[in-house]
Image (cartoon, grey):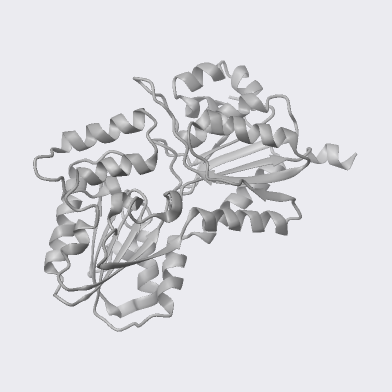
Amino acid sequence: MPGAPADPRRELLLELYRAALEAVDGRRRVRASLAAGARDGPVHLLAVGKAAPAMALGALDALGAAVSRGLVIAAEAAPRELAGDARFVCLTGGHPLPDERSLAAGEAMLEFAAATPAGARVLLLVSGGASALAEVPAPGIALATLRDATAQALAAGTDIAALNARRRALSAIKGGELVTRFRACTVEGLLISDVPHDDPAVAASGLLDSPECRVSVVASLADALAAAWRAARAQGLTAALWPKRLDGGAEEAARRLCQELSAMPESLLVAGGETVVRLPARPGRGGRCQHLALAAAQLIAGHADCLLLAAGTDGRDGASEDAGAIVDGETLARIEDAGFDAAAGLAAADSGTLLEAAGELVYTGTTGTNVGDIVLALRQAPAADRAM
C-alpha cells in the first residue's frame, strides 16, 4: 500500500493544526473563563456536547469543591477523572443521529433540572454535538422522526443553521426550553461554538437560547484560526486568513482555495468553517474534510509546491474516526497506483477509503473541543528545491 513520504512541510501543517486545537481546548478555556469568578458553592453543573468531558474538567479545575453535583453527556465514555467522581453522572448519546441513549440523556437532563433547588447556581457547559447527543422530543414526535429528519438533512447537504432549526422545532428541550426547567436559578452558559457568528440560537439547536441564561462564548473557530495564523508567523511564514467562513459544497470550497493557492507566492492560507457534501444512497467512508481534501488532491496534482490539510477540530470527520487528511501534488498519483479513481471516490462519498490507501489520513482521537473544521493550504517548494 503506497504511503505519503516523509516531508517536513506535512509536519509543519500538523504543528499548526495542533496549535489551533490547543488554543480552543475545552478544559483550558473553561478553566480560564471561571478562574476569576466566585468559588462559592454549591454549583450544579451540566455539560453536554463533544467537548463536555473536557469542559467539565475545566470547571472542576476552577471551582473544585464548590461543584456539588454534575451531569456530563458526551459522544464517548468519560475519562476516569469524571467517571470516578461520585458527584458526577456520566452518559453517552448517539451522534450524528440521536438514538435511545440520546433520549435517556435528555430525560436525565430534565431530572437533573427538577432536582436542582430553586435559587441555585447552575452552570451549563455546551459544545457542538449536543443536538444529537441529548434529546426530548416534542409531544407527538417519535425518535424515528428525529432520526429521519437529521439523516435527510445531512444527506442533502443542509447547512448547520438550517439543520439545527429543524431540530429545534422537534425538541422539547432545545430553543431555551431546558433553561426554564431550572426554577428561579442563576443560570450561566459557557459555549464552545461551532456555528456561524457563534449564535446561541443556532448552537446546539438553541439549548442556551433563553433570556434567563447569561451566555459566554469561551472558544470559537476564530480563536483556532488566529492561533494557527500566529503559529505560522512565528515559523517565519507569510500567512493570510481566508476572508470568510467556508461553507457550501466541499468540492467548491476546494476549488476556491486551490485557485487562490496557485495564484499567490509562497505562503499559507488559513481557513475554516463547515462545508457540506450531498450524499449518495449508499455513501462510503469519510466526511466533509476528507471530501474537500480529495477534491483538492485532483486540483494540485503535479504541483510539488502545494499541500493542503483539512481536519475537524473535534477529531472526527463525518462518521469516520479520522479527523481529516493532508494531500499534496503526488496524492492523486498514489491513489491511482493503489487502484482507485478519485472522481469515482468523490461521487461515491468514499474519500476516506482512497485517502487511506494513499497514506494521507490524519488521526487525533478525542480532542476536547469542537469549533468546526480547519483548512491549511500551503504553497512552499520542497526543501531540496529551496536549497538550490
- Residue shown at the point (17%, 42%) measured from the top left: 100
Q: Examine the image and state in which quarter residue 378 appears.
A: top right
**Viewer-proximal residue, 300 or 272?**
272
Q: Is residue 298 above or below residue 183?
A: above
Q: Where is residue 128? Give x, y as percent.
A: 37, 51
Q: Examine the image and state in which quarter residue 139 appears.
A: top left
- Residue shown at the point (17%, 77%) measured from the top left: 119
Q: Where is residue 325? Give x, y as percent.
A: 55, 37
Q: Where is residue 237? Give x, y as percent.
A: 74, 51
**Viewer-proximal residue, 336 or 150?**
150
Is 308 on the left-hand or right-hand side of 322? right
Extreme residue toward the right, this view: 388
Extreme residue toward the left, this view: 140
- Residue shown at the point (49%, 27%) measured from the top left: 351
Q: Where is residue 49? Give x, y as percent.
A: 33, 53
Q: Is residue 229 above or below residue 152?
A: below
Is 218 on the left-hand or right-hand side of 71? right
Q: Quadrant of the N terminus?
A: top right
Q: Quadrant of the C terminus?
A: top right
Q: How many marks?
A: 0
Q: Is residue 212 visible?
A: yes
Q: Is residue 369 visible?
A: no
Q: Is residue 129 above or below residue 162?
A: below
Q: Examine the image and state in which quarter residue 27 appears.
A: bottom left
